[in-house]
Image (cartoon, helix red, strand yellow):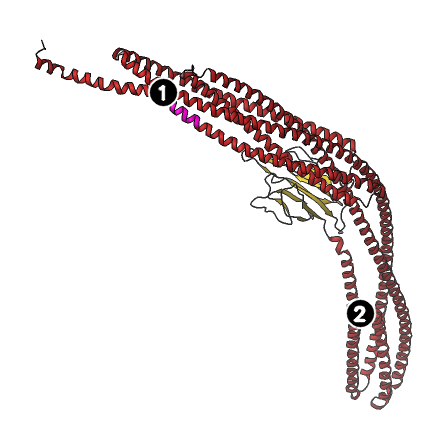
């Protein structure tokens, strides 16, 4: 029982140590069982979606949301109409990330490169961290005129060990664009814009022609209908005149003619008054044209001033371009330094990885040595088990000797044995409790001590047996017992020697294990120091990468500023060109208006001379002509109003240019510290000159605004007078219609009672003739 319990205790402690080692190994291998991960973040030109965090333990489907598959944070299902249901696949395999288009209709793009044609499956494309992925294209509905955006996202890929994957060369390296290529692109864009403007003007002219033809056709149909009505009316009137000539006499006709002549005189008087009003309005229009010409002259002068300012701004932009080229050279030098720093950083990382691999191999060697020591301990435990079996045989022989003694001593022997076994069990319990808390080497030492205690206890038992034999036993068995006791003592002494040897070996092994533990502690301390050094290097690398990113951001900001300055210069050129064209057009229109006013004045003088001899038809044609001229004047006034609006828009644009120049001033003040002292003084003097010129232009613009307000007030007055003239013309037309219809009413009023009288006579003529007796 004692031996079996001791063996169980030993095996239990070994199992505990093995479990602890397996747990440590499992914890060491845990981070390598992780799966790769990916993050999709939305870009500004993308259909909006929430950031997606993916675990790439298997192939992930990318597609449109349906009833069974809804969009979530951990999948690639998007609520976008442009995507297909099974659009693409995304997975991780053999340390690389792959993307495949699965016969999508709108396609899949990686860094603006399509993987396959529509409705065709593509080959797996390797993807790197930082790539721009696009699923589908923007689609516009013709019925609603609504554009459906596509999914555009940036990929961030992480390997199973938690490190970020390497970026592709296309995304990491920024292509340097030369100034010549930028200038060519600018010229191409300007030509395309001019072509677009020409096409738009052609379309507008064609639309205007179509509208004019439609209006002309409508007017033609109306004229034909009016002509037919007039012809029918003339025929009716001629028939009526014939009947009137037959029925009426010359006196009545003369009276009617006198009335008509009086009406004609009245109508002519009203027409003269209306013509006078029209002439006065024309004179006012001429006066307004003169004022507009004056404003045009002032605008031309301002345009010349703006051209001078444009030339000065171009010179300033050239200087800025030279400075920009110098800064580009500095940036190239900085990029070269950054590349050298990155190369040094990579070399440091390689050295750290080599040291890490060396330490891992060293650890593995120490683990192998520890396993060998554990195997030696197990072999010693097995040898100890064989020794314990020999002790059990000795104990059995002792029991047989005790059994050969008298019956009287059996109870005492049994009591002694029970007390011994109890002591052994108590000692076993104590050793078990100690072994559960101590190391395997200490357990070996305690077991050896237990065996020595058992041997010492067995020695007094044998002595007690030798003393009890002469008292309670027969004399015949005494020499035999003495011989057996001598043999037992010899065996016990030999066992003590073997146990002493084993204890010395165990002590040596304990010393070796303690030395190995010290070596392991030293290695662990070295590993901690190396890990601290690695962390410090990583922090330095992170700081260097942040500095590199800040330098890259500053480069991008300077490039954007240069592009803005170029665009502002081009806009100012375009504004000056349009202002010159508008000035020329306004001049031509003013000259045309002058010629038309002169011709109208001549026609009015001719109409005054021939006013007395003009008939009703001529007066009506003159009124129609005057109305048409008024309409033309109205259209010209509307054109002038449009020009005024254009001038206002140009003024707003110039104000915007001023604001942009002020912003440019602020940026120049920021760049002031970077330039040398001599350059700053010259640049400040140029800036002060440009600022004074801008203030002059602003003053001129304020004057232009005041003049435009005056012109607008005059235009409102002209509109009011125009409405009054239109009202007068309508009243004259109504009077003319009443005068035209008045003789017919008079004839009807005179003829109607005569006809009634004749009808009355015709009705009562037979009765009257019968009464008079004239009836035959």
Above or below, comparing residue 514 to residue 573 in the picture: below
Q: x, y (%) of residue 29?
A: 77, 56
Residue identifier under label 1:
263
Picture quadrant where residue 61 is located: top right
Q: Residue at x 84, y 67 (%)?
A: 382
- Where residue 707 sits, quadrant-wise, is top right
Query: Which residue shows up at 78% across the image and 36% down it?
Result: 316
Q: Which residues are magenta?
A: 728-737
The kind of secondary structure element at disc 2 is helix
Q: Which residue is mark 2?
A: 10
* Real-space CA distance between mark 1 and mark 2, rounded to the nearest whole angstrom: 146 Å
Q: Residue furthest bottom?
A: 471
Q: Is residue 444 left or right of residue 228?
A: right
Task: Identify the main secondary structure in magenta.
Answer: helix
Please name whichever residue, 455 or 635, is drawn nearer the observer in this view of the structure: 635
Say whether residue 128 is visible: no
* 21 to the left or right of 72: right
Helix, strand or loop for disc 1 = helix
Q: Quadrant of the N terminus?
A: bottom right
Q: How many neighbours does mark 2 have within 10 angstroms: few (below 14), some (14-19), or many (20 or more)? A: many
Any mark on residue 466, and which?
A: none
């Amino acid at each position: 029982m004692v031996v079996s319990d001791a063996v169980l205790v030993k095996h239990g402690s070994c199992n505990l140590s093995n479990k602890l080692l397996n747990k440590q190994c499992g914890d060491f291998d845990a981070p390598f069982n992780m799966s790769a991960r990916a993050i999709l973040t939305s870009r500004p030109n993308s259909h909006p979606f929430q950031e997606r965090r993916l675990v790439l333990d298997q192939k992930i489907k990318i597609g449109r949301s349906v009833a069974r598959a809804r969009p979530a944070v951990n999948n690639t299902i998007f609520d976008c109409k442009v995507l297909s249901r099974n659009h693409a696949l995304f997975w991780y395999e053999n340390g690389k990330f792959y993307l495949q288009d699965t016969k999508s209709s709108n396609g899949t793009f990686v860094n603006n490169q399509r993987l396959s044609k529509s409705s065709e499956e593509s080959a797996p494309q390797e993807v790197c961290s930082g790539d721009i992925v696009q699923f589908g294209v923007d689609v516009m509905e013709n019925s609603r005129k609504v554009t459906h955006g596509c999914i555009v996202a940036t990929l961030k890929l992480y390997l199973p060990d938690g490190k970020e994957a390497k970026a592709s060369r296309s995304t990491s390296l920024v292509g340097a664009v030369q100034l010549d290529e930028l200038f060519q692109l600018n010229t191409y864009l300007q030509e395309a814009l001019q072509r677009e403007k020409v096409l738009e003007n052609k379309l507008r002219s064609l639309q205007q022609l179509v509208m004019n033809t439609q209006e002309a056709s409508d007017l033609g149909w109306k004229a034909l209908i009016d002509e037919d009505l007039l012809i029918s009316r003339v025929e009716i009137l001629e028939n009526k005149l014939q009947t009137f000539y037959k029925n009426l006499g010359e006196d009545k006709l003369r009276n009617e003619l006198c009335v008509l002549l009086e009406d004609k005189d009245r109508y002519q008087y009203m027409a003269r008054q209306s013509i006078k009003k029209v002439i006065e309005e024309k004179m006012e229009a001429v006066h307004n044209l003169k004022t507009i010409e004056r404003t045009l002259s002032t605008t031309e002068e301002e345009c010349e001033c703006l051209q001078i300012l444009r030339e000065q701004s171009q010179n300033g932009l050239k200087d800025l371009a030279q400075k920009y080229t110098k800064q580009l050279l500095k940036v190239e030098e900085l990029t070269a330094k950054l590349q050298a720093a990155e190369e040094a950083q990579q070399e440091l990382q390689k050295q750290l990885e080599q040291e890490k691999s060396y330490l891992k191999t060293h650890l593995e060697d120490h683990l192998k040595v520890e396993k060998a020591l554990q195997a030696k301990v197990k072999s010693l435990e097995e040898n100890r088990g064989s020794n314990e079996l020999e002790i059990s045989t000795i104990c059995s022989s002792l029991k047989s000797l005790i059994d050969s003694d008298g019956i009287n001593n059996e109870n005492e022997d049994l009591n002694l044995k029970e007390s011994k076994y109890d002591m052994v069990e108590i000692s076993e319990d104590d050793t078990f409790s100690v072994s559960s808390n101590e190391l395997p080497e200490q357990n070996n030492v305690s077991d050896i001590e237990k065996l020595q205690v058992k041997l010492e206890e067995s020695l007094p038992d044998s002595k007690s047996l030798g003393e009890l034999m002469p008292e309670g036993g027969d004399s015949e068995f005494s020499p035999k017992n003495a011989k057996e006791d001598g043999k037992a003592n010899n065996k016990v002494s030999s066992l003590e020697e073997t146990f002493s040897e084993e204890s010395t070996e165990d002590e040596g092994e304990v010393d070796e294990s303690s030395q190995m533990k010290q070596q392991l502690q030293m290695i662990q301390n070295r590993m901690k120091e190396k890990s601290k050094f690695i962390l410090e290097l990583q922090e330095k690398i992170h700081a260097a990468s942040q500095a590199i990113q800040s330098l890259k951001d500053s480069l991008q900001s300077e490039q954007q500023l240069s592009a803005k300055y170029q665009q502002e210069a081009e806009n100012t050129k375009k504004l000056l060109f349009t202002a010159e064209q508008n000035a020329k057009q306004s001049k031509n229109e003013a000259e045309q208006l002058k010629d038309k006013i002169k011709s109208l004045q001549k026609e009015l003088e001719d109409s005054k001379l021939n006013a007395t001899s003009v008939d009703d038809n001529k007066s009506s044609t003159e009124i129609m002509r005057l109305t048409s001229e008024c309409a033309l004047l109205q259209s010209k006034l509307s054109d002038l109003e449009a020009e005024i609006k254009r001038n206002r828009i140009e003024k707003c644009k110039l104000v915007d240019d001023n604001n942009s120049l002020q912003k440019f001033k602020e940026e120049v003040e920021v760049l002031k510290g970077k330039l040398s002292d001599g350059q700053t003084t010259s640049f400040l003097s140029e800036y002060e000159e440009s600022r004074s010129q801008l203030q002059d232009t602003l003053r001129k613009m304020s004057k232009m605004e005041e003049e435009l307000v005056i012109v607008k007030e005059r235009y409102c007055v002209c509109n009011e007078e125009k409405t009054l003239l239109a009202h007068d013309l309508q009243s004259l037309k109504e009077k003319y219609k009443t005068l035209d219809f008045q003789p017919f009413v008079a004839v009807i009023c005179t003829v109607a009672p005569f006809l009634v009288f004749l009808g009355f006579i015709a009705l009562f003529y037979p009765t009257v003739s019968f009464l008079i007796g004239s009836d035959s």
